[in-house]
Amino acid sequence: MNRNQPKNTYQGGAEQFVGFIRLSSNENSYGPSSDVINEIKKNTKFSNIYPELDGESLRKEISKSYSIKPNQIILGAGSDEVLQMIYATFTKPGDEVVFTKYSFAMYSIYAKNFKCKTRIFDDKKFQFDLDNLLKCVTSKTKILFLANPNNPTGSVFYKKELTKFLNKINKKTLVVLDSAYCEYIDNKNYDDGLKLVSKFPNLIVTRSFSKIFALGGLRVGWGYSNLKNIIKMYEHKKPFNVTRLSCIAAIASLRSKEWLKQNIKKNIDNKKFTLKNISNDAITLIDTTANFVLLEFQNKIIAKKYVKFLNQNKITVRSLASYKLPSHVRMTIGTKADMKEVIRLTNQFDV
């Protein structure tokens, strides 16, 4: 690589994927539904035509799928662009934002880009009490970011505690509920936040098509909030920010309801299989409600050695050193065949 090549400050998963079992970026290893692939193929010939203005058809399909209002939906090139629009809309230099220490790196990167002050809650126990997070919020806090469930720690909060938290927090503080992994949770006590928007005008929910829907390479996400917030965010949104093929693929994904159920079940089954069959004394396994597990090692040297060992065997997993968790590794749950190979190699791994 050219040493003079500018670099993005975000550290993603491994770039390798051709010939690799790729378990480093929480993608859906099964890929999109066949209906999605067919729709993409049918519509590539229209790639010379600009997308619909503001993705009207996709917003209508999201509205239909989740019984929410289409004019309160905003699309982004991935949910991280929605987060960027939130910063651009609701902060100015010097404003205070709050998020947890071990959370999505873009919260911190955008805070720096928009010259915001940060208050960081130390979620070293991974699963924590929202009342403790509330103690981090001050009268000056402009935005609080809460991922539910969280990547990479797997912390998750259910409706009762979440609603209690939203009732307590200062109504002048905007709460961004990042629900990128919500589809993986099959629990009636969980709430993705969409229905809470009508009750809490300071709530914005962000969602993604990159995880369970397997469209990470097409970059499409969305946000939902009250109309007043969305109108303000549109001032910072590019009219054609989500591509024609991305919108078409996302619509087909939402209509692939049986495919979605099967993929949720596959994730649960393959995760249980992985947790049951990894038996290496050097590793402590930490389960999550999402599509990944954490592997904890005695120290960062062993963790680094494990990542290298798998990489040499054409498997990528995510070192969490960039998250300041150098003794931890995040492993996406892939296909059953993927996990069988990972289990075999992991059980062979010698400290």
Image: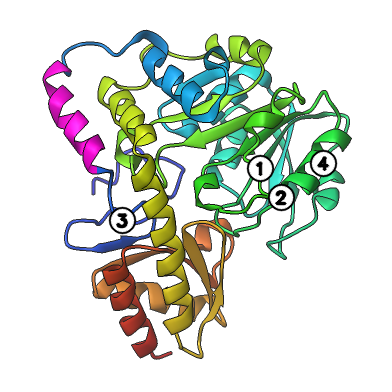
Within 10 Å of disc 1 (Cα), the crowding (few <14, some 14-19, many 20+) is some
| Percent x, y of residue 293 | 50, 66
Q: Is residue 237 magenta?
A: no
Label 2 or label 4, whichever comes before in sequence order: 2
Label 3 or label 1, whichever comes before in sequence order: 3
**278 or 111: nearer the eye?**
278
Secondary structure of the residue carrying numbered label 1: loop
Magenta residues, as a range? Answer: 34-46
Q: CA distance from mark 2 to mark 3?
A: 27 Å
Q: Are marks 2 and 1 in contact (CB under 8 Å)?
A: yes
Mark 2 or mark 3: which is in front? 2
Secondary structure of the residue carrying numbered label 4: helix
Q: CA distance from mark 1 to mark 4?
A: 13 Å
Mark 1 or mark 4: which is in front? 1
- Please state which amino acid type lies under the numbered disc 4: Phe
**331 or 109: nearer the eye?**
331
| Percent x, y of residue 206 | 56, 33
Q: CA distance from mark 2 to mark 4?
A: 11 Å
Left or right of 339 on screen, residue 100: right
Label 1 or label 4, whichever comes before in sequence order: 4
**172 or 61: nearer the eye?**
61
Residue drawn 34% across and 46% down? 259
> Can residue 92 be seen from the camera position used here?
no
| Percent x, y of residue 44 | 14, 24
Q: Which residue is mark 3?
A: 29
Q: Which residue is mark 2?
A: 158
Prevailing secondary structure of the magenta residues: helix
